[in-house]
Image: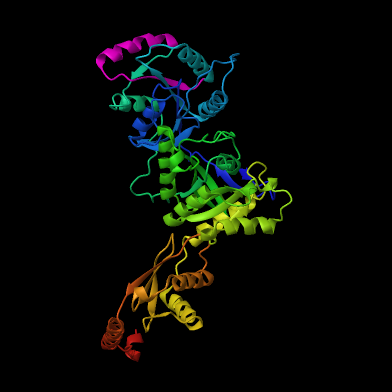
Amino acid sequence: MMKNSENGMENGVAAGAGLPAIAIVGRPNVGKSSLFNAILRRRQAIVHFDSGVTRDRISASGVFEGRRFNLIDTGGLAMFSGEKRKVGFWDHSIEAQVEAAIDSAVTILFVVDVLAGVNPLDQEIARRLRASAKKVILVANKADNQKAEHLADEFHELGFEKIHTVSCLHRIGIDSLMRDALAGIAENTASAGEPAERRPLRIAVLGRPNVGKSSLVNRLLNEERVIVSEVAGTTRDAIDIPFSLRCGEEVVNAVLVDTAGLRKKSKIDEAVERYSMMRAEEALENADIVLFVIEATTLVSTSQDKTIARMIQDSGKGCVIVANKSDACTGVRRKELIDDLRASLPKMLYAPLVLLSAKSGHNLSGLFEAIAELRAQMSVKVSTAMLNRVLADAQERNLPPIIGGRPFKVYYGTMTGNCPPRFSLFVNDPALCAENYKTYLENCLRRAFPFTGFPIRISLRARRREDLNDILARKKMFQRRREAERKKNFKPPREESEDEFDE
């Protein structure tokens, strides 16, 4: 359970949704991510010919023959236990992520390359897995034909009882593999009579590279869930992490999505990085709330920060601006820092700004409060009567513009949706509304109603005065008809005689 460093209140907890976990492990470039996608029947993890594409452990829930499970993809193990040679930072970090996945799993799918034969690293990984005392299934991948299937016999020397030959490309052998992996696990899919689970709140963490997105994710979950380094581009895939979020007295099921840093498109020169950008944009599209991470130490936002801000605003998603590394801003007053950051993102004034330090956990409570506030705004609905009172008051205080001798008129308005809040205003001519007056109406709506963190969408629809009069006339006619029917069907209460009570 996540405990806030300042007040000790429990705010969030990493969750596995109570499902049995299946971890996929193996050396680099044997097809672990391809197997991950083949089992889930969707392109969840990035797959590329280069080795080392997967670094963090990626998890997703799946269903097979009535049994739900949590599938975990891991990076390739490229070092021997106690190895003395100089190994890179990624090797140590990936190894830690794989060990965490093995600890949490009930079944391990050990993937090898049937075409490459037994590799010394395969033997090393087999030794480690036997020591884990977990259920291990050996998966010989890339068995695309009968000849390749016969090549799997040499993997018996790794000491596992059964070998499953599969082809992720053609989905050969996947069903048989999953039956073996889930043997002994009871059906746990919700039946038709049970209520469907409410969609979890999706919270995406976005920002340019190296601003502390992964550090923030680890701080929110209170565990080293994703790899953190000073190297830009550490995170490559969008990583979905289920967890529980406490909003006041309510515990909310949520999914935290860590994404790759969004760079300028002109600086993207690798295929893997292009896939990473696509996954980050997809995470934004599917999110309910975005944590837009910027670096407080820069005092002003960069051009790339402004580009990301425009993406978030155009998406219409709820947003909290997280100014990370604020503890490093020495000699700057808090108010001055906020004013400078606000001035550099003028289009995001509607989004709450939280100064915090992902490294120390300072002011994490402020971030949880902002998320809870945005979640509350998602269910706000404004009645038509209340909306029209606000619009009438706004027009009285600031008369609409007159263009070409014709005044702009707002007849009435209605709220048509939320997330983001959407309003349709019926007017005499949308072309008569100056952009600054539309902004004025938006500001009036924002002052009147609690839409913190969401952009407001206003659409102007032309409606003639005659049309409006027709609507009002039909409304009055309908009311008179309903009143007449009510009087026609009215029956006075029957008077009871004394004889009815005689026995």
Residue 394: percent from the left, percent from the top?
A: 48, 79
**Where are the magenta residues, as a range?**
133-158
Q: Is residue 183 visible?
A: no
Residue 365: percent from the left, percent from the top?
A: 64, 52
Front residue (pair 435, 243): 435
Q: Position of 363 compared to 496: left or right?
A: right
Q: Is residue 188 above or below residue 494?
A: above
* Quadrant assignment, res 229: top right
Front residue (pair 461, 301): 301
Residue 93: percent from the left, percent from the top?
A: 56, 27
Q: Is residue 169 visible?
A: yes
Q: Is residue 456 above or below residue 278?
A: below
Q: How many marks?
A: 0
Toward the right, the furthest residue is 331
Residue 263: percent from the left, percent from the top?
A: 48, 42
For image coordinates 65% across by 41% down, the residue present is: 359
Q: Is residue 97 above or below residue 16?
A: above
For image coordinates 58% across by 50% down, the residue present is: 322
Q: Quadrant of the N terminus?
A: top right
Q: Position of 110 compared to 498: left or right?
A: right
Decide whether residue 137 is among the magenta residues: yes
